Amino acid sequence: MKSRAIELRALTVALALCSTQPRWIYSQELMTSDALAARLVQQIENGKSTTTTARQLESWGMAAAAACARHLDEEKPRANRILFRVISRVGLARRTHRELLEIYDPEADRAFYSKSSADLQQQIAVSLNWKVWPSEAYEALIRSAPAPLLGWLLEEARSAKPRHDRIRRTLSYWGWWVKAGHERQFREKLHLAASALSSRPEVIRDPATLAILLQFAERIGLPDSSELILKGLSHEKPEVRLSAVLAAKKNLSPKARAAYLKAFETEQMPSVQAALARSGANFLADEEMGLAVVKLYDRSNDMQVRVAVLQTLHGVRWPQREALILKALDEPQHEIMQAAIQAIPEKPDAAISSKCISLAREAAHPDPSLIDALGRLKTGKAVPILVKWLGDGSVLMRIRTVLALENIGGAAAQSALLEQLTRERQEIVLRQLVRICSLTSIPGAHARLAELCTDTRQKFHLRIEAIWALGAYDRPDVRRFLREKKKALKSSDDSARASDLIADRSDQLEAFLIMALHRLKEGGSSEEVDRVFDASTPGTKVSMLFMLTELKRDHSIIGKALSSSDYAVLRGGVAAAKEAGPSKYQSRLKELSQNPTLRSIFSSGLETLRLEELLDETLAGLNRQQEP
Amino acid sequence: MQMSSEQASRSGVEVAGKMKARGKRPEDLIALSLVLLMAASVPAHEPPVDHIDREAEMWVEDGRLWLRYQISLPPRAAMMQIFEMDKNMNGTVEEQEREIFFTSFGQKLASLLRLDLNGKRLKLEPAGQVKLSPPQKQTWLFATPAGALKPGKYSGQLLDRFSLNYAGFYRYVRSREKAESSRIAVSASQKIESRFRHPNMVVLQFSMEVPE
């Protein structure tokens, strides 16, 4: 590593001397991170603003933390606070993937992953021996000096006089750090620390520390926290019982589970009861738990508890669910009735369906929860009410009503949607209607869609979505229309492309036209899809893959997307492959699923597009198909 | 091979910080003026596509137009570059893999940064190695070929087609130090039109003079 650093420096000097480089780059007055840290301290001592220096210092990455650590001094609390802030900010690098640190911040890589890491971390951790810890130190230590801080926690677990305040603040910050997916090195060791702290009477004797420890256990996903939860559930302080309820997950020991179920019958504090009700959502298919939650509704007169019980009913499969909803629909309290309406599932039993329709008929104005619930009934009886509300509602109400009608489906609902498509003027509602036309080919909507495509007063996105929706109508006039539009685009294209300034617009427009023609299986369109995909921006590629997913049709662009190094395009490719018939792509999908870099992304907060889940689902589906 | 973060910040972050702090128009040196315009029409990307912030700076020196182009990658986009580098998929990026990637990426960027001077397309070439600095910044240097510019006045446009692929926040940097050291003054103004609080495609329009 050292020789590489020397090599890098030599290269820099060589480049600096190279005649092709402009003078200014290398003739700057250089300020090292040490010099900047010294200047920062001087500015603090002179009472001057430190913002610019701190920002410059932070741009050095972890080298800045090392430079700041050298200036930490117990006797200088004002300077310490600012130094710790810098250390904390650059310490965010610890959440970064190691592969990136190696390339972009080698100092951070050394600080967290090399054998010499202890030195730098120990320098920062000098404050562990101070009488007073600055409040900024907690975050800074967790981010930049986790190893010594962990050692300190374990020492505290052994201590006869643990420092509760410091333990609580450390666990609180660290728990969030783990929960956010930032912890890359100490997950298992934190489990050990949590277990060590939990086993010490000196630690858990303090109710506030026990409550924080329970929250910490939940945030770090402590595998066996049953004993700790058991202690918390039987505690006299409601805040401890609340933390115990929040920490309770599926993997409770039989003893802890029994205590947890018992709490539904014995707990008196409404805030804890409400938490118990909400925690029922962790046990979707557990009938015993369902019964306990439903009984809690009957036992409690508190509105927040009853509302919490009803809110828990979304998605659960407890047999008692529908009877409770029906009962709650008759409650005089508005909040409870609203929660009951929101809890109505898809295609409920006849009694709920009929009650919901009668409530809607009685309603003086369109009600958002009722609109959604009517959609979930999936019955034609709800259509006349929704049609009436479509006429009176605000934009948001109209969107909800349109979605409810889509959910119901059938001729009456489609006829209402077609009428709305003709008279609607709001772009946001029109986009929903166009999307529904694309998905369900509402009969007779093609003429209005063609109007929207050519209406220059409409937003560009609405117009291109209308083009795609037209592809759902296999009619000679639609085919002709789309062909003409494509031809027109081509003729205007040369001047447009010459300036390059509308490249993005023509790129998207062309993509949507080609995809609509491909949807209609127009001759030659498949090759065009390839050509346009190759020339498109990642955003347009994602749109094209999304359209292909909707078609559930295979195409060579799927293979290209599966080789893309753009995360969104890659994800679009996997989604399209899943719908098109993934067996053809099985080996590539497996490769992606096992790729170390992607796995590294999956295990962090960077996975926001559910690519891992999609890959797993697709591969599991393939495995099921291939089972004998 | 890339430079370390320390070296990178010499020309990158630190310099930019100083420039921003001091950057006022030097009254005595007017040779190059820039008018920065945004050409924004429709969203250049869909929401799931990663954003990349960028910073640009142009100047004339030794008869060449130079462009410092810095991009700040979000962690996922930077990881996906690693994904692309790691051809043998062993989870580690070897020196050679890294070098191949950055050479190719530099060429790609150069091809996406389209420079027109007095209505003629002029090629920008990568000049030197990319400088990498924390958290995930890449500082690139591009220049027109030596001898391609004759002394005189020019009006030009730089079209950043990379920003079309990956939109993000954009900043033009003016450097007093650079202006002084190269005897070139920069006058810049910028107009940003954006529907999503960041430009869709960066287009710099400018006029400049190459001294004798």
Image (spheres, coloured by chain):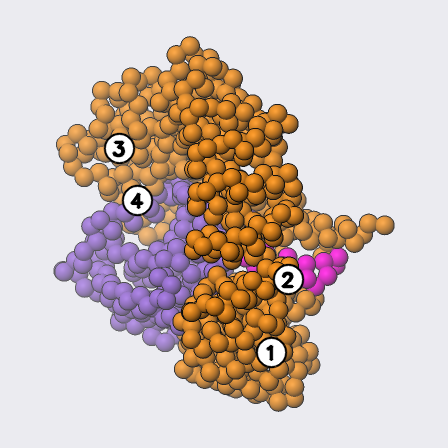
Residue A294, image x, y percentages = 57, 43
Label number found at residue B14: 4
Indicate left or right for A613 with A182 as reference.
Answer: right
- Indicate the secondary structure of the residue bearing disc 3: helix
Q: CA distance from mark 1 to mark 2?
A: 21 Å
Instruction: Indicate which disc, 3 or 1, sits on the residue closer to the N terminus.
Output: 3
Indicate left or right for A174 with A315 as reference.
Answer: left
The residue that mark 3 highlights is: A82
Image quadrant where residue A125 sits: top left
Indicate left or right for A628 with B161 as reference.
Answer: right
Q: Which residues are magenta?
A: A567-584
Q: CA distance from mark 3 to mark 4?
A: 20 Å
Q: Amino acid at mark 2?
A: Ala
The residue that mark 2 highlights is: A350
Image quadrant where residue B26 sits: bottom left
Q: Amino acid at mark 1?
A: Ala
Residue A556, image x, y percentages = 68, 66
